[in-house]
Amino acid sequence: MRRQINDKMRVSKSEQQSQNMNKIFSLHQFFKITFHGANLFPTFCPARWMMSIVIAVCGLGAVDIQASLAGWDMSGLAGGANNFGASPLAPNDIDPNLTIGGLTRGSGIGASGTAAAKAWGGSGFTTANNTEALAIAGGQFVTFTITADSGYEISIASISAYNIRRSGTAPATGIWQYEVGTGSFIDIGSAITWGATTSAAGNSKSAIDLSGISDLQNVAAGTTITFRIVDWGSTGTSGTWYFNDTGNTTGDDLQLQGAVSAVSAPVPEPAGYGLISAIGLLGICGVSTWRRHFTVKRARTIFSRKTTAF
């Protein structure tokens, strides 16, 4: 299995640390506040540094970069007699901080007959399973799973454009679903007509946007997300259905896009306490400087009056 990740689409840990320090220095410069020409918060005043760090940590977090989470390339599948591809079929590409359960045929999808090359799927669909509910009950679906490893969380943005190949009597309709943890399966959008093309060219399908599904955002480590593709509407038991090689290339033909984020260690005390502490330091440092400025100015005034009296 190849374990690849698009490094150009990620911000390295060292680069992120450098960016955060730049934010702190910029904010530190921002807190140059003066009173009657005097800098209330001198260069080395702890309050300026504290306020800068608190805002940088609380308000300017790291930005998640969209990347491939997992991808399957069908171009290497040979097809032939009873060779519809392994079940489960492991992904070719996977984010190193994720655990992926491969493409798996449900109990109602067989693997008998002659399979097409450069495609993964199955055969033996039952004509009686002619609705979504009946197809689910009959096991006519394909699943795969995704789980963030310890110390990470996952947000899923989309299923990239893909291609479906089918024979003339195979299921004509299907739908994508998702399940989070041990919850119920939920439909993603509406039913999809797979298309009439039965040749190797297959039927191109648009990408599916998942970014608006809150259930699929910031999913904690250890919580498994299951995707399911339900098929129904076959007109014969010898029909075949596949995820097809797109454009006869070695790129991913089925790909999940999103972001994997490292989860920060728990803060010993609520962030609000840190902000209150920073504001308190601002007040202490500011009042101290103001008193020092006022005392010097008052001393000068008294000295001036005494000089005038003489």
Image (cartoon, helix red, strand yellow):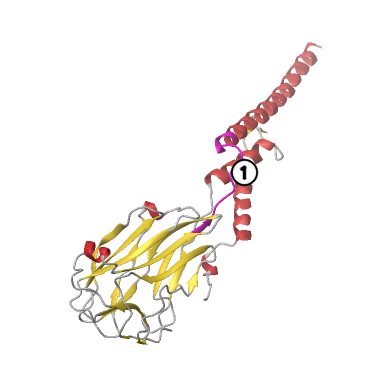
Tell me: residue 298, above or below residue 260.
above
Towards the viewer: 272 or 44: 272
Residue named by callout 1: 53
Numbered label tally: 1
Q: Residue furthest bottom?
A: 80
Please say whether residue 114 is visible from this viewpoint: yes
Residue at horizontal 58%, vertical 32%?
276
Q: Where does the image place residue 238, in percent across and percent down from the top left?
A: 24, 81
Please say whether residue 117 is one of the residues in the magenta stretch. no
Q: Where does the image place residue 42, in percent across and percent down from the top left?
A: 69, 37
Towards the viewer: 60 or 44: 60
* Crowdedness near tag 1: few (<14), some (14–19) or many (≥20) residues, C-alpha within 10 Å: many
Tell me: residue 189, above or below residue 247.
above
Q: Where does the image place residue 218, in percent across and percent down from the top left?
A: 45, 53
Q: Is residue 99 left or right of residue 248?
A: right
For the magenta stretch, what is the residue range? 260-273
Please say whether residue 242 is visible from this viewpoint: no
Q: Secondary structure at mark 1?
A: helix
Q: Quadrant of residue 252?
A: bottom left
Residue at horizontal 63%, vertical 60%?
14
